[in-house]
Image (tube, helix red, strand yellow):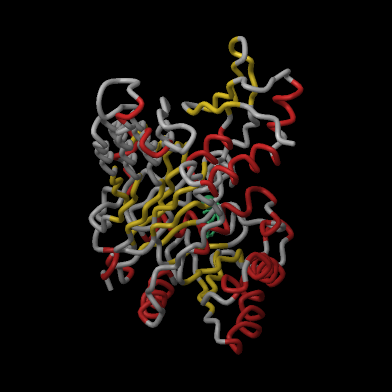
Amino acid sequence: MWGACFFFKKGVINMFVDQTKIYIQAGNGGNGAVSFRREKYVPNGGPDGGDGGKGGDIIFEVDPGLNTLIDFRYKRQFKAQSGENGGKAKRYGKSGEDLILKVPPGTIIREAETGKIMLDMSKADGREVFLRGGRGGKGNTHYATATMQVPRYAQSGQEGRGYWVVLELKTIAHVGLIGFPNVGKSTILSMISNAKPKIADYHFTTLTPNLGVVDTQYGGGFMVADIPGLIEGAHQGVGLGHAFLRHIERTRLLIHVVDSSGTEGRDPLDDIEKINYELKAYSETLGERPQIIAANKIDLPESREYIEQIRKKYEPLGVRVFPISAASGEGLKELLYYAGELLQTINKDPIVFETEYLDDYDEWKTEEPHVIEKVEEGVYEVSGYNVEKMLGYTHLDTEKGFVFFQKYLRDQGIIEELEKAGIEEGDTVRIYDLEFEYFKSR
Ligand SMILES: Nc1nc2c(ncn2[C@@H]2O[C@H](COP(=O)(O)OP(=O)(O)O)[C@@H](O)[C@H]2O)c(=O)[nH]1
Ligand SMILES: [Mg+2]
C-alpha cells in the first residue's frame, strides 16, 4: 500500500511547502566575434570571427526522493550559465552549462502572470528542458558577401529568456475529502491523521488543501486531502472554484462528505447532487471518479431519515454509503478501511495535466515594435526584438537570405519609415552590429 508514497513521513507534513514563486532565466548566447585573418582592415585578410556559444538551458528534473519545495524557499533566482563570446581564428565560444532544477514528483510549473500550466512534472522519471538558452551570435565570417568583404559586424548573442514562475506541489493525496463547507471534512481529517486543520474555519481562508497520512488504526498507508471551498458554481470559477477543483482532479478516490442531519435548512440529497454536478461540469473524468459517501453527523437525530434516503438512491448505483460521526469517531474505521481497499483496485498511474501554455520558442514574448533612429548624419539605426530575431534566422551570406531579409524589412514597413525619416541613397542603415548601405529600389 505504501508504494509511491513512501517518502511521506509523519511529522514532516507541517513543513510542506505547497507553492513558491521563483525567477528562472536561461543563459544568454555569447556574442559573435569581429576579427580578421591578418591585420585589421586589410581587405584580403578576410573575416575570421568565431560564433558565440549557446546559453545554458533551464531543465526541470523530478527527484522522487524530494517531497517539498523547501529548497526554493531560500533561493529564488536561478540563471543558467551564459555562452562565451566567439574568438579570433573562428574560435567558437563555449556553450553555457545547463541548470538542472530538481523538484518533487507532482510539481507543476505555472506562469506567474497568468497562472497557466507551463509544465507538469508528475511523471516520476521526468526530465524536461523548460527554457532553451539563447543562441550564440554569428561571427563576422558569416557576413562576408560579394560586395561586403570586410564585414565589421557580428551578431549579438540572444538573451536568455526569463520568467517568474510559480512552482506548485500538487496534492498527491490518494483520497480527497469533498463536500460543501461545514459538513465536517476538516473534522474527519483531524480524527484520522496527524493533520491539524482548522475546524469550522471560514472556507476561503486557504487555497491549500490540508493533507494528512491516515493513521494505522484506520488502515494507514495513504494520504487524504481535505479540500475546502467547493460551492455551487465552482466549475465556473465561483469562489476560486477552479483552484479547488484542480486539487480534486489529482486524487484518485473521493470521499463525498455530506451533513446527513440536514442542519441549516439543507437537504443532504440535494447537496450531493449539486456537488456532483460541479465535478461533472468541470471535467468528464472528474465526474466519473470513484466515490464513497460519508453521511456525517449521525450523532444528531435528524440524520436517521436522510441516511435511508441516501442509501436507497446511491447504493444501487454502486456507491457505498457510510454513516459516520466525525465528532465521536463512530464509523470512521469502516469508512477508511473500505477506502484503503478500494484504492488498491484503482489505477495508480499519475494523473498528468496538459500544458495550457503553448509557447513557441521562436516567438519572442515581447512584441516590441522596432525603433528607427537617426544616430548621426547619414546613419540610421533600426532596433527591436523582432528585427533581431529575424537577423538570427537569416543567412545574409547567401543571396537568397539577403533578398529575404530585405523583403522582411519592406513588409514590416521599415523601409518606408526610413524614407519618411529622410534617408538618402548611400546612407548607412545599422541594425544591431550589421551595417547596410541604402539604395532606393526602383
Ligand atoms: N454534531 C456534529 N458536528 C460535527 C460533526 N463533524 C463536524 N461537526 C461540526 O461541524 C462544523 C463544521 O466542521 P468542519 O470540519 O470545519 O467542516 P468542513 O467545512 O467541511 O471542513 C464544526 O462546528 C464541527 O464541529 C459531527 O459528526 N457531529
Ligand atoms: Mg474545513
Residue 123 place in picture, x, y as percent: 36, 64
Q: Nearer the viewer, residue 95 or 17?
A: 95
Q: Nearer the viewer, residue 315 or 359?
A: 359
User: Is residue 422 positioned above or below 298 on the image?
Assistant: above
Along the horizontal axis of the image, is 99 left or right of 356? left
Residue 79 place in picture, x, y as percent: 34, 34
Residue 410 place in picture, x, y as percent: 69, 38
- Kindly indicate the quadrant of the structure image that contains residue 382: top right
Along the horizontal axis of the image, is 191 left or right of 431? left
User: Is residue 98 positioned above or below 33 on the image?
Assistant: below
Along the horizontal axis of the image, is 355 left or right of 338? right
User: Is residue 293 positioned above or below 152 on the image?
Assistant: below
Q: Nearer the viewer, residue 17 or 224?
A: 17
Which residue is rendered at x = 36% and y = 35% of the image? 139
Q: Nearer the viewer, residue 16 or 435?
A: 435
Residue that sits furthest to the front in the current view: 44
**Quadrant position of the C terminus in the picture:** top right
User: Is residue 280 positioned above or below 212 on the image?
Assistant: below
Which residue is rendered at x = 45% and y = 54% of the image? 119
Residue that sits furthest to the bottom in the current view: 316
- Kindly indicate the quadrant of the structure image that contains residue 441: top right
Which residue is rendered at x = 55% and y = 82% of the image? 319
**Quadrant position of the N terminus in the picture:** bottom left
Tally of numbered discs: 0
Q: Is residue 74 visible?
A: no
Along the horizontal axis of the image, is 273 left or right of 253? right
Residue 375 place in picture, x, y as percent: 59, 13
Q: Is residue 54 visible?
A: yes
Ligand 1 found in image quarter: bottom right
Residue that sits furthest to the top in the current view: 377
